[in-house]
Image: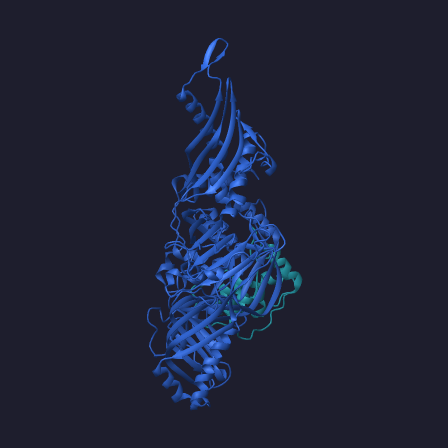
Chain colours: A cyan, B blue
Amino acid sequence: MPGYEPIAISTYEDLLEQEPELLHRISELPHGGQLFLMHPLQLFADVGADLPPQVQQEFTDRHGGDPGWSLEPYLALRDSALEQTSRVQVHGLFRRSA
Amino acid sequence: MNALAGCDLVWEISHSGLLKQLESTPMPLLGGRVLRTPFDLTVPGPGGTLAHLIVTSSEMDINGDDTVTLTFAFTRSTLIAAAAGQSLYPLDGVLTINVTVRLRTAPTSSAIVLDLPGSVVSLQLSPSSTERLRSAAHDLGLTPDALLAGLANAIATYVRSQPALEVPVPFLVAPDAEGTLQPQVRVRRLRLRCLGPAERTQQGIGLFGALFAGTEDAGDPTTRDHGSVPPGSDVLVGLSRRTFLTFVFYPSLAKNLAAKKGRQQPLPATEIPPPSGTAASITIQGVDVTQIEGMLGQGRLQINTNFHKSVPCAELSGEVVTYVSLALNGNTLVPTPTLGQVNTDTDLDFWCELAGAVVFGPNEVIIGNMVRDTVDGLVRDLVGAGIGSMLKLSLPAPVPGGGVNLDSVQIQPDIFALCAHLLIYRPPPPVPDVTLAFIRKTPIDPKTIPGVWTTQLWCKNEAKSYDYTETRQAQAHTYELQTTLVDLPITVQFSVRGGGGPWQPLTRDSVLGQPAVTIPALECRYPHPLAAGGSVVIRDVTLNYTFTGNQVTLYSQPGQGNFGIELRADVLDATSQPPAGVDPSPYVTLAFTGDQVVMGEVYKSDLRECGKRARAVSEHYAISQSVPRWKMAFTAAERDILDDWEVLTSMPDIGDDAARHFRTAHADVLDRVEAARQTADAELSTGLEVVVSPQLEQSIQALQAALQNARMRQ
């Protein structure tokens, strides 16, 4: 995992504003899209956006509640250099209300 | 002298009957196996060695000195001296065990005891085996004589350290109580006698019982020198005349006389007509029965009955002899009474007029018919019908847990005997086998992490937050290579493979640290994210391993998730060849579970509710499906889970959602399915196929419509 310039996030709106940069950093990771699906909060932290608890909670609430995240598979995939049978590319990180 | 030897009762088991017993009773002496060859046996040898004996034949003799001799011939056997790194192979010879037979009696149970702790054991090696041991003795730090004597002593010590072998017998012994035949046989004294002529078909063990006060010392079993059980039968139960009359005939009579009088309980002895005298008489069908005497005849029972009957103008009295033959119908004795000689005295008025009509004249035909009708009905009703059932009840089952099949009835003036053969399940003899046996699975450093999952179950109207627990751990799996009837010592090479890769040997000579093997590109499963039904990661998996003898233990590491690999053992026997007649390379599939989620009760309860709907549909309509053989590796409860899974995954629309939740709830079972599927065995790839009947399809469509309507109404 490369080192990243920290991204300051204090509110959920800050997080939304940083979507392009976060998307850019995630897309450069070998399994970024899949890691995002596995544990987005950990991925934000890994790419430099360490979210405060209230932002984490708001992110979770706005996306249907905790879907059952765990670090176990996330770390296993992050540390594996092998090609995966399932590949994911993300083009947006947040649910946008119409 | 008949089989009773002057005693009240004899129970005799033949050579074949005792052999059946030993062939069906697991013995600690034989490592928990029954006496059926071939079998193998490992016993401690001299100086820390192990003697592995492959017994190819066994014989048994019952001897007249109240002993039994067991003779075991062994071949292809080995003396393993692990410390010296030597194995002396092949050895062959004969092991002889002479065991004293005695009787253990108690008020609650009795048994014939083969006294192994007091046995005399001898070992006779073939000349080539003797020479092999002599020439290798020095390498083991022993003199040739010390090695040979030590081996014989070690085997004798092993045999004598075994518990006595008991063959249960259906007798209770109570010296001060009255003897009985029902409901159990209880005697005042029981004596054992081994009947041991040279001819095995005449060998047997007899138990001689005393049932009456004063008969404890009657008879002499030592006068018996050969068995009485006829060929084809295994046991014989013999009753003396007195025993038969006391415990079979008169109880039967008392019961039937009571029934004729409409009474529930058998008549007491004081109300039963005696064999002689006129102390008691009983009136049945207008006939006064004054005496009844039962006897054992030659091949049949004999019943003498004295009677008296008053008719108008006449008095009839006399004696009738009835013979009862007993035929076997399956396990039932069917009595057939035959009227024998009738002696009648008739006192009548020569001309008797009653109400103006002549009743009697000097007409013998009329008198004879009347007498015959009277006694014939009497005997049939009173005696014949009850005897069979009483005899049936009186036959003691020779062995607990087994049955008997009656073969014949023998009736002689001094003995009534039933012969039967034993119905005992005898397990088949062992066959050569090489098995990778599961020993244990141990979690290492398990960590439990609580979690909450917000989701909407497919049969629910809204999302809920469900508690769950995630357990992360490493695991140690231990397997052992076990052999049966394989020439020892064996050489074992363990290998592993996974993800379709090649077999990788597990080496025993690691240079540094704990040996390890890496299985590349293995499919590892994780239950998270729960909403996605888990994830799959292709990764290299490194397993440490250790050996203990023929055991191997494989250790997973934290974070490796759930995965399946195969473990194989390639075996060579003492001849450095793959053992004949077996698969020399057995393999097993290991499912490592390093990451598991257990959902809370609320989730499970809600899911059960959803499952009920699916099951209702499934059970209502016929589903035809093939059941792959691999499913038999799962328990019945697990197969139910798989059946549910098949139904759910066959339902379009709701199938994906239902299946995801189902996988979360039963990840352990389904992961094992996945682990099995990863193996190269084509049989496993038949997978979870289900053929949905047209009726089920219709019902699924109806269910979907109902669900859609329900959602639209919200």
Q: Is residue B61 visible?
A: yes
Camera-side residue of B96 and B32: B96
User: Looking at the picture, does residue B347 appear above or below residue B487?
Assistant: above
Camera-side residue of B646 and B215: B215
Camera-side residue of B277 and A79: B277
User: Hey, which residue is sitting farthest top in the picture?
Assistant: B356
Residue A94 lies, in percent from the top left, at: 55, 58
Question: Which quadrant would residue B711 be assigned to in this image?
Answer: top right
Question: Which quadrant would residue B228 be assigned to in this image?
Answer: bottom left
Left or right: where B528 falls relative to B519: right
User: Hey, which residue is sitting farthest front in the picture?
Assistant: B350
Residue A76 lies, in percent from the top left, at: 51, 69
Q: Is residue B617 visible?
A: no
Residue B61 lies, in percent from the top left, at: 41, 66
Residue B221 lies, in percent from the top left, at: 49, 60
Q: How many marks?
A: 0
Camera-side residue of B657 and B103: B103
User: Looking at the picture, does residue B706 appear above or below residue B158?
Assistant: above
